[in-house]
């Protein structure tokens, strides 16, 4: 079980112009500025009596705190609502909104009509509020639940157009889209028939309502959508973005076979060692040179599965390639070549996760790690590593302790954003729970093909912390049983059928398109190594932000202050607003979505302001 709740974790944690390539590191060097804390701008309504609603509430608390959005909380079972005119928006993680008595419901409706924002994060109903929320006056019933697809129809973020997310047992009200409302997402059955809206937004007087007819915002993968819902109903605020991108080369450098393995032997006439040296690596380097990508490579020495000594390196020295007419061991050679351009991280002695259930005790783990350390020093291709990537993305507290003992240089632990917490997954960006001196830098996406599931995770994290953390494997083309199952689950053909180049369908051209997609929509991301990303995240976690939205007739000026200079921020405008000017910074990216406009502003110093006015007729 978790040692800290999401909110407790975050309380402890927080106590470039657009172009074809990513830029260099832009960490501000100015002395920190003291930022005066803001009064809460958002009121979060929760229901402590509903365990399902509390899942949404926990995600909302964490996301709002991570986004530096000051909020207050009120339990609908605790009596009358507080004064609403103290807030700019209300978010609800409540199903039984009828817990609000009619006078309270009237106050909430008046708040929205006067210009406030209301985001329903978890489908809720109240007979008194149905018209406000875009629900029919009749009694509500749940739609039959089964295998469905949620399809976004009005993108809330760049690159989110037409996102299709398979779901099972989706619980939603069987309602039509109300007149005057715009669908954010629709429910679709297996035959492609539209079943009804999964989310919508409606203008109400001077304010706006957004309603999610599902419980998906109570999951980690939808945090970015939760925060974008707030931006839709309350655009007069900002959200800092850490602004970096890392691509890990997992299991590389690593041992490679001299055998004629399919499908590469038939497709390229190369052994694995030759394929990695002569095709895969040159292609990946070429992509990095064209786009500005930087890699963090993860060294592993064996795949022998041993958890007891002796720990030998025959596999590491087995592969052979010809370099300048001379036959050389592939692994030491490629490690030396790659170290000239990439961070060299540790993946382990072999591909056995550092789990007590596999190794039996920390002593055996330590022996294997010491063997890896000695080999690293013997080959001397790079400084000792400061980043560790767990094999199979799994590690436990015993493994972390063994790692720290043998490699005290390790500062960054790059596990998984999702997965099982007890196996080192489900990590947040911040101190590693089992060793707070380490920084947890979880990877959020993987693979060469931008599937819908990967797109959801990528976009959500981009709109939570403003970063992309990704990994690929060189041996993806060699389809083992687990990889075949994974591809089938995504509705994809076998990697053997896809191939590496294979026209426009190969893994490599698919990854080129993925990188191009990120750079098209998020050109302000800086390409960095994992070690550099962890350094930036430590600074980002210490960032304080405050803002004021000042109105003067038909114009408004958003004034922003940060404790560190040179920061990047998401800023939003309503569709009827235009940017009149920016002082102390510059707009590096803009996106006119169907229901909101999103800007990315880079500040020159600790302060900037942006002025909006009415769009020209």
Image (cartoon, rainbow, N blue to C red):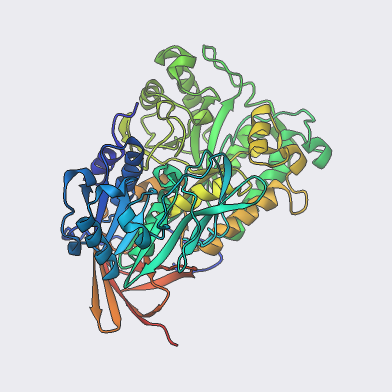
Res. 231 visible in picture: no
The quarter of the rendered structure image containing the C terminus is bottom left
Q: How many marks?
A: 0
Is the residue 246 above or below the residue 516 in the image? above
Q: Quadrant of residue 430?
A: top left
Give the residue at x 28% y 33%.
4
Res. 256 visible in picture: yes
Question: x%, y% of residue 529?
Answer: 47, 48
Question: x%, y% of residue 258?
Answer: 75, 29
Question: x%, y% of residue 577?
Answer: 39, 78
Q: Is residue 260 left or right of residue 122?
A: right
Toward the front, the furthest residue is 138
The quarter of the rendered structure image containing the N terminus is top left
Give the residue at x 28% y 76%.
557
Residue situated in front as seen by the camera: 96 or 563: 96
Residue situated in front as seen by the camera: 229 or 450: 229
Give the residue at x 45% y 69%.
180
Is the residue 539 above or below the residue 220 in the image? below
Q: Is residue 548 left or right of residue 497?
A: left
Residue situated in front as seen by the camera: 158 or 362: 158
Is the residue 258 above or below the residue 590 in the image? above
Toward the bottom, the furthest residue is 617
Q: Quadrant of residue 252?
A: top right
Residue situated in front as seen by the camera: 446 or 56: 56
Q: Quadrant of residue 473?
A: top right
């Amino acid at each position: 079980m978790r040692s800290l709740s999401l909110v407790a974790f975050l309380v402890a944690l927080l106590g470039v112009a657009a172009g074809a390539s990513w830029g260099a590191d832009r960490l501000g060097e100015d002395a920190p500025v003291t930022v005066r804390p803001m009064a809460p701008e958002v009121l979060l309504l929760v229901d402590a009596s509903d365990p399902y609603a509390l899942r949404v509430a926990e995600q909302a608390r964490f996301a709002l705190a991570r986004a530096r959005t000051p909020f207050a909380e009120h339990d609908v079972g605790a009596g009358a609502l507080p004064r609403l005119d103290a807030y700019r928006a209300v978010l609800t993680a409540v199903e039984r909104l009828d817990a609000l008595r009619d006078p309270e419901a009237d106050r909430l409706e008046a708040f929205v009509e006067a210009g406030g924002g209301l985001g329903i994060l978890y489908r809720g109903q109240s007979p008194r509020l149905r018209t406000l929320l875009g629900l029919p006056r009749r009694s509500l019933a749940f739609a039959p639940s089964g295998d469905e697809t949620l399809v976004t129809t009005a993108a809330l973020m760049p690159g989110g157009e037409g996102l299709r997310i398979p779901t099972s047992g989706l619980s939603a009200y069987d309602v039509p889209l109300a007149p005057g409302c715009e669908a954010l997402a629709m429910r679709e059955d297996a035959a492609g028939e539209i079943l009804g809206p999964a989310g919508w937004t409606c203008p109400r007087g001077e304010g706006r309502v957004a309603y999610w007819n599902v419980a998906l915002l109570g999951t980690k993968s939808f945090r970015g959508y939760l925060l974008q819902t707030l931006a839709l109903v309350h655009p007069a605020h900002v959200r800092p973005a850490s602004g970096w991108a890392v691509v890990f080369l997992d299991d590389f450098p690593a041992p490679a076979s001299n055998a004629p393995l399919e499908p590469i032997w038939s497709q390229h006439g190369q052994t694995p060692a030759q394929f990695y040296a002569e095709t895969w690596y040159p292609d990946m380097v070429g992509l990095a040179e064209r786009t500005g990508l930087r890699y963090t490579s993860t060294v592993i020495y064996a795949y022998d599965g041993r958890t007891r000594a002796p720990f030998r390196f025959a596999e590491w020295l087995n592969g052979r390639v010809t370099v300048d007419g001379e036959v050389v061991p592939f692994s030491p050679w490629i490690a030396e070549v790659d170290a000239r351009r990439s961070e060299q991280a540790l993946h382990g002695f072999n591909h056995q996760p550092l789990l007590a259930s596999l190794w039996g005790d920390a002593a055996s783990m330590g022996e294997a790690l010491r063997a890896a350390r000695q080999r690293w020093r013997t080959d001397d291709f790079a400084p000792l590593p400061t980043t560790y990537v767990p094999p199979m993305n799994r590690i436990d507290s015993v493994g972390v302790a063994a790692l720290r003992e043998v490699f005290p240089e390790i500062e960054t632990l790059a596990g998984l954003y999702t997965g099982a917490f007890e196996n080192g997954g489900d990590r947040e960006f911040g101190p590693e729970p089992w060793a707070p001196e380490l920084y947890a830098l979880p990877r959020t996406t993987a693979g060469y093909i931008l599937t819908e599931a990967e797109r959801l995770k990528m976009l959500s994290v981009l709109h939570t912390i403003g970063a992309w953390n990704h990994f690929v494997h060189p041996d993806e083309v060699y389809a083992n049983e687990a990889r075949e199952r994974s591809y089938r689950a995504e509705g994809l053909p076998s990697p053997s059928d896809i191939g590496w180049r294979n026209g426009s369908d190969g893994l490599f051209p698919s990854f080129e398109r993925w990188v191009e997609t990120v750079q098209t929509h998020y050109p302000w991301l800086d390409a960095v190594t994992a070690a550099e990303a962890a350094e930036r995240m430590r600074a980002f976690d210490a960032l304080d932000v405050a803002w004021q939205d000042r109105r003067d007739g038909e114009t408004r000026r958003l004034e922003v202050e940060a404790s560190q200079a040179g920061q990047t921020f998401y800023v939003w405008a309503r569709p009827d607003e235009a940017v009149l000017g920016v002082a102390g910074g510059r707009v590096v990216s803009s996106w006119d979505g169907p229901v909101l406009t999103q800007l990315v502003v880079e500040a020159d110093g600790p302060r900037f302001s942006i002025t909006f006015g009415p769009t020209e007729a």
